[in-house]
Amino acid sequence: MIPNKAKPDSFIDLKTSSRICALTAYDYPTARILDESSIDIILVGDSLGMMVFGHTDTTKVTMEMMINHTIACSNGVKQSLLITDMPYRSYETSESALTNAKLLLEAGAHGVKLEGGSNVIPQIKTLIQNNIPVIGHLGFLPQSIKEEKYYKKKGKTESEKMEIKRDAKLLQDVGVSAIILESVESDLAKNVTESLKIPTIGIGAGDFCNGEIRVINDIIGSYPWFIPPFAKPYCSIAQDIRDAVSAFRSSTLDETNL
Ligand code: KIV
C-alpha cells in the first residue's frame, strides 16, 4: 500500500543519479528548506532521539515520535524523497514491521529505512511484497548500541568484512532500493559499492559510496556538544542563536527600546 504522495519512480532514479545527497530533518521548516534545496533524500532519522529529544541514543525513540515528525516533515516536502526510520523494536516480526511501516507511510513517508542484514530479511521481504520501498542500513547500527557498548568503525576484521558483504548482497537480492553504510572502513565500503547494482549511501564510510548522508545538525553546527569525527560543519547555527539571543537580551536592557 503506497499512499498518493509516494514516488516509487524516484527510487528507480536513485540507481542512475550521479551522486545521492541525503540529509536528516525532523521538522517542517528544515524539511522545507532541504526540499527547496533539491536534496535527493530527506530522512526522518531516529537520530531525532538525540537531536530533538536529548536522549543519549536511539533506543528510546517510539513509533509515535516517528509518526509525528514524519507528518511535520511531509508538510514541507514536494520534490525530495521522504524516508522515515523504523524505530527500535518496531520491526521485530514481519507483522509488526508491516503494521508500523504502513503507519509511517500514512504519516507521509515515501519509504522506510531499517537497520540490519540477514536478521531482517523476512521483514524487508514482507514490506517490499506490500509495495513499501525500503532502504537498508549496514555497518555500525545505532539501534544496537546496548549490545555494542560504544560507537565503533565496522569492517576492520575479516569476519566483519564478510558479514557486511554478505548482508549487502542479501539486502539487494530482497529488493531494497539503496543501502546506507555507516562507519564502515573505506576499502570495504568501496568493495561493497562496486559489487552492488543498487546505490550505497555513506556516513563515515570514506569517499567511494554512491552518495552521502549526514545528520542535519552536524553540517549546520546546531548540536555543538557532540560532533562526529567525519562531520564537517558548514556554519554554526548554535553560535548564531547565541549571538541573536545575546543581541535580543541587550535590546531588552536598552531603555531606548522601552
Ligand atoms: O537516524 C539517522 O540519522 C541515521 C543516519 C544514517 C543519518 O540513520
Image (cartoon, rainbow, N blue to C red):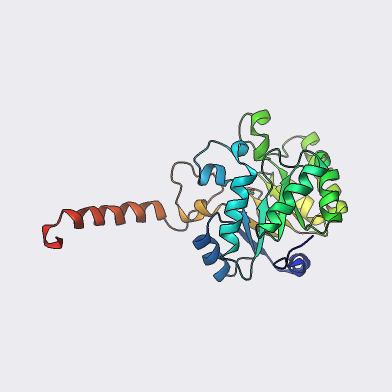
Q: Nearer the viewer, residue 240 or 207?
A: 240
Q: Position of residue 110 (x, y in %)?
A: 70, 61
Q: Nearer the viewer, residue 215 or 233?
A: 215
Q: Is residue 117 visible?
A: no
> Left of 92 or right of it: where is 217?
left
Placement of the C terminus among the 4 image quadrants: bottom left
Residue at (77% x, 38% y) in the render: 92
Residue at (11% x, 62% y) in the render: 256
Q: Is residue 154 visible?
A: yes
Q: Position of residue 96 (x, y in %)?
A: 77, 43
State the count of labels.
Answer: 0
Up the image or down, 48 lies above or below 28; here it is above
Picture quarter containing residue 251?
A: bottom left
Q: Position of residue 128 (x, y in %)?
A: 83, 55
Q: Nearer the viewer, residue 7 or 215?
A: 7
> Left of 32 or right of it: where is 84?
right
Q: Which residue occupies the extreme left position in the image?
A: 255
Placement of the N terminus among the 4 image quadrants: bottom right
Q: Nearer the viewer, residue 253 or 200?
A: 253
Q: Position of residue 104 (x, y in %)?
A: 68, 53
